[in-house]
Image (tube, rainbow, N blue to C red):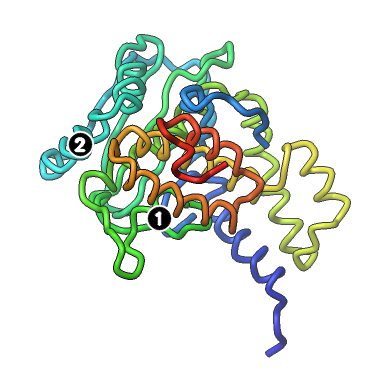
Amino acid sequence: MAMISSRVWFVFLALVCVGIASLAHSSYGQRRSETGNPRGDEVAALHTVNPSRGNNVRKGEPTTGGIREEIPDKYKKRYEEWKADFLSTDTGRQQWDAYAGNTQFLLTITMAPENRNGGATGKYKWDDSGKLIAATIVLGNSLDHGYPNPIYYPVQNSLSPFGTSFRIDGEILAATKLAHEFGHVNRMSITNSEMYRLQMQLIPVYNSILLRNGYKTNDPKLIAIERQMGGTPIELWEDREYWGEANAMLFLRDRFNKESLRCALFRRIERSVRMYASNYEDRFITIAQSSSNSDACGWQ
């Protein structure tokens, strides 16, 4: 068998992820640019979202507002524990209250066993003016277990055990994953619906050409599509995941008042971000520097 270069193999694997999900957002579901440098507390409003499987861009459908929790009875106890941990922080309460009190936007939260350790966000709806009026978060029924890889999930992975170091799971892990999903909804609320629709139309075209030409990303047709979409499918996908992770980091910033633990987490996040996502480091640095005594964490 002929050897495949690491670059081509990476493109192939990434293409499979994006192709299967059609740029679907599925955080740690075994599936898998922004600019500016807002203040840490403003980052909550700047997290991007990805469509989930079966998601369509729908307009003008009537909806009621607030948060609708559709949790099966057998999962309600664990869900309430995860929710309580999320709401124990200023970030969690502020974001929850913002959606719960919004009469013009409906956020549905449900649970499904298909993606046991992860979450997904999608089923977006816009009104005729292009304003987002609905979205759905689907949580795995074992959200409190499982750590995603550090490449696209440096914040969630920071909670995993490393050698003999600490391990954080249970409600905190689940609440961190919930914060990631809220980050996607936050970002989609300020995403241009027409650009989103264009990306959804062009991504399958891009992937089809890439498969046919032997994964040659310098194909003029692909470059033209990339310009229309604002990036390659992989770039769009990873950018959106890192915005979700930024919101998860905001949650952890508030969740851990003990400086030594918070800094230990931030140092692990820093290592992963600089190794795998250096182009996106600013959004994480902003949050680190927004915490009290952030200089002690060493992330500058």
Q: Which amino acid type corresponds to the residue marked 1 in the rendered image?
A: Asn
The N terminus: image quadrant: bottom right
Height in image: 299 above or below 257? below
> Which of 218 and 238 lies nearest the eye of the viewer?
238
Residue 72 left/right relative to 45: left
- Outermost residue, bottom direction? 1
Asked whether residue 53 is in view, the answer is no
Pinpoint residue 221: horizontal percent, then vertical percent: 85, 50
Q: How many marks?
A: 2
Residue 122 left/right relative to 275: left
Asked whether residue 92 is in view, the answer is yes
- Measuring 58% from the left and 25% from the top, which residue is drawn there? 38
Q: Which mark is residue 6?
A: none
Height in image: 87 above or below 200? above
Height in image: 284 above or below 20? above
Pinpoint residue 294: horizontal percent, then vertical percent: 45, 36
Residue of label 1: 157
Residue of label 2: 71
